[in-house]
Amino acid sequence: MSIKFNDLGISAPILKAIEEMGFEQPTEVQSRAIPHILEHKDLIVMSKTGSGKTAVFGVSMLQMTDPNEAGPQGLILTPTRELAVQVDSDLQKMAKHLTHKTAAVYGQHSMNIEVQALTKGVTIVTGTPGRVFDHIQHGHLKTKQIRFLVLDEADRMLDMGFIDQVVKIIKTLPRDRITLLFSATIPPEVKRICTDYMKTPYTIEIESPTKTVDTIRQLYYRVEPQEKQKWLNRLLLMERPESCMIFCNTKHAVDRVQRFLTQKGYACQALHGDIAQGRRLKTIEQFKSGEFRILVATDVAARGIHIEDLSLVINYDVPLDKDSYVHRIGRTGRAGNEGRALSLVTSDDIMSLYEIEEHINAMIEEGELPSEEAFNAKRAEADEWVKANALKVRPSQGASEGGRQQASQQRSRKPGDAEGRNGRPQASDRNRGTKTASDRNRQGNTLSHQGRPVSPVSDKAAYTKTTNGTGMRASTSDGQAPRSDVQLRTPNSSSPQTNSQRRDSSRTVPSPTPRDGQPTSTGAARAPGAHRVVRASQPVVDAQPSSKPSLRTGGSIPAETGSSASGTASQNSKKSFFRKMVDRLLGK
């Protein structure tokens, strides 16, 4: 005799919501577990993923909590953010005809939004251990009224290192509560929690006559490491799945495979822990709704995420953990439907594969890689499938998303974009090597040493330097700051000197001739960020004459034309600094 939801003692509003969600009959775990929870018993449920565990605690908590009471009454801990969001979404659907309010709290989500939701009042909170504990510590999550605690995927929380945080959370909860623990396996650490923090729990172990792996056609293919991408593409074309999840062991591998498939023209997305939470949730929803059919992911997406009618799972990398294999392929073949799981196995992976076979107590069949003849026979069907799964805009070969954006910006840059508001090249452009006045200055300058010309002139690029006794300044004749490299030239040569030559020349260069009675220095120093070429004993002429007050005299220094100019107040204040720089450059 088949059991119906009506026989489990579920209230009418919840029954109506369940019916609208498309559930007709309870699964084995639902029919066995819900009555015990409604009798206020602690429960340990050992069941494989995809067995309908969410409805077990969701229905029970909604029926046994009062939305009019203050404070959260139920707390659900999940190992991943994605699972927390999905559980909260399922609770909202089950509570469609109730007044219960729920909230999900998890890392990489706005703390302010979560605090606002908790402050307004919620009945059931779902979250990851780390974020839940943060809210408890800061007083945002009140635990005095919590009467239900659910540990979902407890073994996974252990694997991810959350058990210590889980224990800390449990210690903040009232002792008078119902504790429900769901786990595919019960490792010793999880069993210790059951012993220490549960009251004579009732254990339900679901041994389905058809295990999860028994409903899935499993194959593996031996490939060379450098040919994995090639055979991944071939197998996709041969299988032509309606929807497919490809699992990799690392985030970098996920990104690499996703880029490869995108360059091949497939519409696919990546899912791993480094992707922003909002984008991850959007990606999952888009995959569920069929906006794209290929999802490349790490094990962060392997548990708790229910994808309707997922037809194919591909293990691009053989999982490092044996349980992860079961959870990966458990995405397909749900609710008794037949699924397919393929694994690409290199010579380094074969022993891990044998261990997985022992773990699942089943032999995984070795498949034969499709020959060229078999592939050509399916060419027409493959082309149709590719068209159905193609990107709307195909990226250029080898271009990553960031690279494409950068290239687009460079193509769209106007000629004037490299200049500032005053029309001068910006520092960033000069640093990148944009040719400025100082670059042209290397090709020829007209500087004199005691009246003797040194090299041909380029009057736009040439610049001179001066000291007026109050400060020194370096600039090009067109008012732009020269480049930052420092070169020293002898009076009779325009070629740069080596360090040793620089020290020698600094000892032998005669003092420059004073101009108009103004004191001079044996060298020139630049303002911060200025670029210059320094020549030994070269009188320096300010290219921009000005007349500004002198801090030393309180009066003004008259502007000079061509040969010298007055220093500014800021230059006066830095006089000592500049002279020290001059002495260092000239080896004093």
Image (cartoon, rainbow, N blue to C red):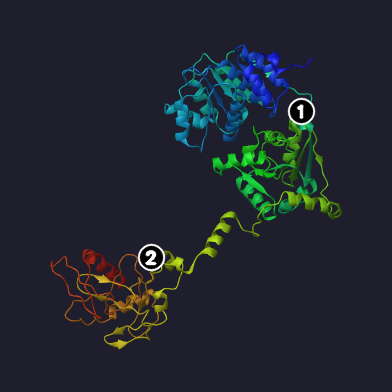
At 48% from the left and 69% from the top, the residue drawn is 415
Residue 402, quarter of the rendered image: bottom right
- Coordinates of residue 470 in the picture (x, y in percent): 20, 70
**Who comes first in sequence, dot 1 or dot 2?**
1
Q: Is residue 335 above or below residue 237?
A: above
Q: Are marks 1 and 2 in contact (CB under 8 Å)?
A: no
Q: Does any portion of residue 224 appear in the rendered image?
A: no
Relative to 344, 177 lies left or right: left
Neighbours of disc 2 within 10 Å: few (<14), some (14-19), many (20+): few
Q: Which one is in front, 88 or 537?
A: 88
- Coordinates of residue 571 in the picture (x, y in percent): 24, 66
Residue 332, quarter of the rendered image: top right
Residue 29, quarter of the rendered image: top right
Q: Amino acid at mark 2?
A: Arg
Q: Amino acid at mark 1?
A: Lys
- Coordinates of residue 436 in the picture (x, y in percent): 41, 73
- Inter-mark Cα distance, 1 to 2: 70 Å
At 80% from the left and 35% from the top, the residue drawn is 363
Residue 421: mark in rendering: 2
The N terminus: image quadrant: top right
Mark 2 element type: loop
Q: Is residue 60 above or below residue 265?
A: above
Residue 261: mark in rendering: none
- Mark 1, residue position: 211
Relative to 420, 163 lies left or right: right
Mark 1 element type: loop
